[in-house]
């Protein structure tokens, strides 16, 4: 930090040039967000101004060719998939973080963590492909048709679990060992130490992980596109196919024109709004956690 | 406040020193201290955000002499040194007011060439701060940046400066090895060499021996003494015995109500034998501070 | 009187933890086993260099690798200078509480959270249509560059901030200019961090599909220029799996290649980090 700016009085011309060019880069990088939001807005403007937001909920259904753009089932499907996967991934992720810290023999714990890191590195298209080839037939053999909300939830669980597990893992690592030692010295059992000390102390970190996981689940495209069946409907049970906002965009962008295209951009805007909400909650939590540690 | 006045008695009556480059070579301790002002602070105050760290310092420092700054912790000695080469500019929220004259040029003027100023005023920090490169590169970077590109000259300057600090024999076979591999004392001497390789006129030493063992500290101290006459040295030290051994002049800083002030300034023997201010006598006799 | 410790609860908890771990490890091992099992036997030099035939059911992935390489090159060539410059600006010229720094950092943080499909939409509207680049490698690379910038800047900035302030002060005390301080002292010290940032960004770009579908396109011919449409590895997998009946075996092999590349990328990042931290712990 700090080659402070009032130091510019060093006459060196090159220093000024360096500062200017760095400033240009920084302005470019900083204005990127505005550019992205601006363009999504610009493209969705026709739909926003002519159709308005209400038509997304009041139209008879999603029939772009007949200018009927109801997004309710799609938004519903997105929410169901995301919430379902978080319900599975949160406990699994937290339990695996606990496993690494308290249950696993040291070497196994390390290997397990590496495995989770590898899992985090697998591209979503590969998850989708595997889901399509292995998971979907499996679900189908249990209850046809196969491509379904359930398959989507399972794949998403695998994908967001590393986020939750790794963040929880590091927030557990920050629990002062003195707490754990003194709790153990009081004769508390392992699970009692976890339940009464570790989990409460690291709860903010865990929540951060859950919200980031939720954001990731909402924004996920490829995997869900490949395993969910992409039928526009509100599912009545777990084995019904669904379509999510992201899948809808990916499927229809290629040929969408006019209002249809504009509505797709608008759904992108809605998606971005949702995701950014969760991300900012997570950021606020992280901030709070850092604050608590600083104290 | 009366005591800051006493410094005015030291103000030389003779003509001031001429240009930068014309200092006379070292002859003897006595002669070097023939008062010709090299550096002068007038009404210097330093503020960190809201906190006044140093107030109204008036101090003159003579060419070719070793001036020791002493005083308890937190009285603004480091801040004073940093203002001399305007490193205070780099500290967030730090403001310096007053005048600082080097050879009568005000270095606080808005268009001062800072690179030139810092070349002219070398500085060593309390903790050795070598760059994480080879020993040679540590010395080469400043030289190259100040326009010396010729390989032969570079090599000879490096050798001379390392010899000056007595490091040459210890490191001549490992010039290309990382400087962090040196011991603390060697690192500090490397920093000194790095500052001296630019042949500055003024050397600011901020507790150069505080992180060193007695032997290395002795080596560095001898080195500083050998600089007398060639460089104007301003050294901060907590070690009064060291100040007594090496300093020509001593300036005592003190934090009065949390605000740093110059209490007394004068020739070393006067300060140590007949201090004017009661704080000074208390400090050097060890009853205060 | 205290009751004896609750051994049933304890056992239950242990059981629960181990069950969870098994539940997670199984699909992971299954997935990687599947990829290796079905992908490995087809993997050969020939597969890597030859052109896809019969919509990708047969043949290899030569042109697709080339397209991927070109997209990554464009992406990094754009993202690296901007990222490095911004990171330097943020770490050297702004303080944490300064408005400009806060704005830029905040907007990058938000950008990092934007889902990749939205980047795809943006790239399609901005690069393909407004700038008239069409479905091309250039559009795809530029879109990915926008996407990886936040992670790149964050990593690089952190590595600059990790350099001790003493170094900057002593450089300044030697009268070394800011340009030279950056060039000779900060950059060399931060190079590993810069590399790691770039590698992480590259990994993120390589794994990306959704942002590329409607920016770089589907064409699986060998690209002749940056304005050609080119198919990335991830899109190839998607296409084989979804649109080509009987493309599974080639999809497996392509997935194996993609994961192999990503693994190399991530391993080299962690190798550099490790090397760097051990170097920094040099005796001093
Ligand atoms: N970067 C800074 N920000 C805010 N206040 C500072 C800063 N540096 C120094 N100060 C304050 O200025 C005063 C003088 O500090 P300075 O470092 O100059 O003291 P010092 O005499 O060198 O002490 P020591 O002998 O311990 O090195 C102290 O009260 C200190 O708290
Ligand atoms: Mg100090």
Image: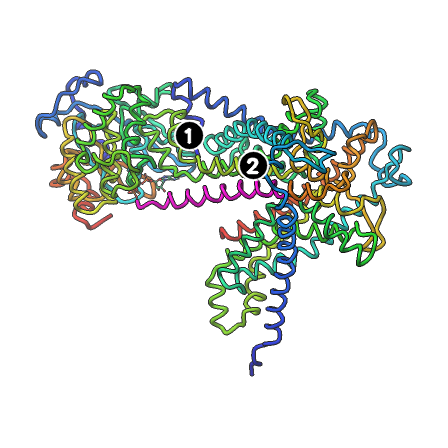
Quadrant assignment, res B45: top left
Residue holding disc 2: C201
Q: Which mark is residue A3?
A: 1
Parent chain of label 2: C
Image position, residue C154 (x, y; %): 53, 38
**Span shown in magenta:** C255-284
Q: Which mark is residue C92?
A: none
Cβ–Cβ below 8 Å for labels 2 and 1? no
Q: Is residue C274 magenta?
A: yes
In the depicted structure, whether residue C73 falls above or below residue C3: above
Q: Is residue B138 above or below residue C250?
A: above
Q: Which chain's residue wears label 1? A: A
Do badges 2 and 1 share one subunit?
A: no
Q: Nearer the viewer, residue A196 or B206?
A: A196
Residue B234 position in % (x across, y down): 22, 32
Choose between C63 and A33: the one closer to the eye.
C63
Quarter of the image with the N terminus of chain B is top left
Residue A244 lies in the magenta-colored region = no
Q: Secondary structure at mark 2?
A: helix
């Amino acid at each position: 930090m700090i080659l402070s700016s009032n130091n510019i009085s060093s006459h060196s011309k090159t220093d000024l040039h360096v500062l200017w060019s760095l400033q240009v880069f920084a302005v470019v990088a900083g204005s990127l967000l505005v550019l992205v939001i601006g363009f999504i807005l610009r493209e969705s403007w026709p739909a926003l101004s002519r159709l308005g937001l209400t038509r997304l909920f009041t139209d008879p259904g999603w029939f772009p060719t007949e200018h009927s753009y109801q997004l309710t089932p799609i938004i519903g499907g997105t929410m169901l998939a995301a919430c379902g996967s978080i319900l599975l991934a949160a406990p699994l992720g937290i339990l695996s973080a606990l496993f690494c810290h308290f249950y696993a023999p040291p070497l196994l714990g390390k290997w397990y963590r590496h495995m989770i890191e590898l899992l985090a590195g697998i591209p979503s298209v590969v998850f989708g492909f595997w889901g399509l080839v292995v998971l979907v037939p499996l679900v189908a053999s249990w209850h046809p048709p196969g491509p379904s909300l359930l398959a989507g939830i399972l794949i998403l669980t695998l994908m967001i679990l590393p986020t939750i597990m790794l963040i929880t893992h590091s927030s557990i690592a920050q629990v002062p060992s003195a707490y754990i030692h003194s709790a153990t010295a009081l004769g508390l059992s392992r699970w009692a130490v976890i339940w009464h000390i570790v989990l409460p102390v690291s709860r903010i970190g865990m929540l951060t992980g859950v919200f980031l996981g939720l954001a990731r689940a909402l924004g996920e495209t490829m995997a869900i596109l490949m395993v969910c069946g992409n039928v526009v409907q509100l599912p009545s049970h777990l084995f019904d196919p669904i379509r999510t906002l992201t899948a809808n965009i990916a499927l229809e962008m290629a040929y969408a024109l006019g209002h249809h295209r504009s509505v797709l951009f608008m759904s992108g805007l809605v998606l971005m709004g949702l995701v950014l909400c969760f991300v900012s909650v997570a950021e606020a939590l992280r901030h709070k956690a850092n604050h608590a540690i600083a104290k | 406040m009366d005591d800051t006045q006493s410094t005015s008695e030291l103000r030389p009556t003779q003509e001031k020193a001429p240009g930068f480059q014309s200092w006379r070579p070292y002859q003897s301790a006595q002669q070097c201290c023939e008062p010709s002002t090299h550096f002068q602070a007038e009404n210097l105050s330093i503020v960190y955000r809201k906190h006044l760290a140093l107030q109204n310092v008036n101090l003159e420092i003579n060419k070719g002499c070793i001036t020791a700054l002493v005083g308890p912790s937190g009285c603004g000695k480091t801040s004073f040194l940093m203002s001399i080469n305007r490193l205070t500019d780099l500290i967030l929220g730090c403001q310096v007011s007053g005048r600082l004259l080097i050879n009568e040029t005000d270095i606080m003027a808005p268009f001062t060439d800072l690179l030139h100023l810092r070349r002219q005023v070398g500085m060593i920090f309390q903790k050795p701060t070598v760059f994480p490169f080879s020993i040679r590169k540590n010395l080469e970077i400043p030289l190259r940046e100040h326009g010396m590109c010729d390989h032969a000259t570079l090599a000879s300057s490096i050798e001379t400066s390392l010899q000056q600090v007595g490091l040459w024999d210890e490191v001549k076979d490992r010039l290309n090895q990382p400087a962090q591999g040196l011991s603390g004392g060697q690192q500090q001497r490397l920093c000194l060499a790095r500052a001296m390789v630019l042949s500055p006129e003024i050397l600011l030493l901020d507790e150069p021996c505080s992180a060193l063992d007695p032997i290395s500290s002795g080596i560095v101290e001898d080195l500083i003494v050998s600089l007398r006459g060639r460089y104007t040295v301003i050294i901060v030290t907590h070690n009064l015995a060291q100040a007594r051994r090496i300093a020509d002049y001593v300036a005592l800083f003190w934090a009065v109500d949390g605000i740093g002030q110059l209490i007394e300034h004068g020739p070393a023997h006067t300060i140590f034998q007949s201090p004017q201010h009661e704080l000074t006598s208390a400090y050097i006799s060890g009853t205060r501070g | 009187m205290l009751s004896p410790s609750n051994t049933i609860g304890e056992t239950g908890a242990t059981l629960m933890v181990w069950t969870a771990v098994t539940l997670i490890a199984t699909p992971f091992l299954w997935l990687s086993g599947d990829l290796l099992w079905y992908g490995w036997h087809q993997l050969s030099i020939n597969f890597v260099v030859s052109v896809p035939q019969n919509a990708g059911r047969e043949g290899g992935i030569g042109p697709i690798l080339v397209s991927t390489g070109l997209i990554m090159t464009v992406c990094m060539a754009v993202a690296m200078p901007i990222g490095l410059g911004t990171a330097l600006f943020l770490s050297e010229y702004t303080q944490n509480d300064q408005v400009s720094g806060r704005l830029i950092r905040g907007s990058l943080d938000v950008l990092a959270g934007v889902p990749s499909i939205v980047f795809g939409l943006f790239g399609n509207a901005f690069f393909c249509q407004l700038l008239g680049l069409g479905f091309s490698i250039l559009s795809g690379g530029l879109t990915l560059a926008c996407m990886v910038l936040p992670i790149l800047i964050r990593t690089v900035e952190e590595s600059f901030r990790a350099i001790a302030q003493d170094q900057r002060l002593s450089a300044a005390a030697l009268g070394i200019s800011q340009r030279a301080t950056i060039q000779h002292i900060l950059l060399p010290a931060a190079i590993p961090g810069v590399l790691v940032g770039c590698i992480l960004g590259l990994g993120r770009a390589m794994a990306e599909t959704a942002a590329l579908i409607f920016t770089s396109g589907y064409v699986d011919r060998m690209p002749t220029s940056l304005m050609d449409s080119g198919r990335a590895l991830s899109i190839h997998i998607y296409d084989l799996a979804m649109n080509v009946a009987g493309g599974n075996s080639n999809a497996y092999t392509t997935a194996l290649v993609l994961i192999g590349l990503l693994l190399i990328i991530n391993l080299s990042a962690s190798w550099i980090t490790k090397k760097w931290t051990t170097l920094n712990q040099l005796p001093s």
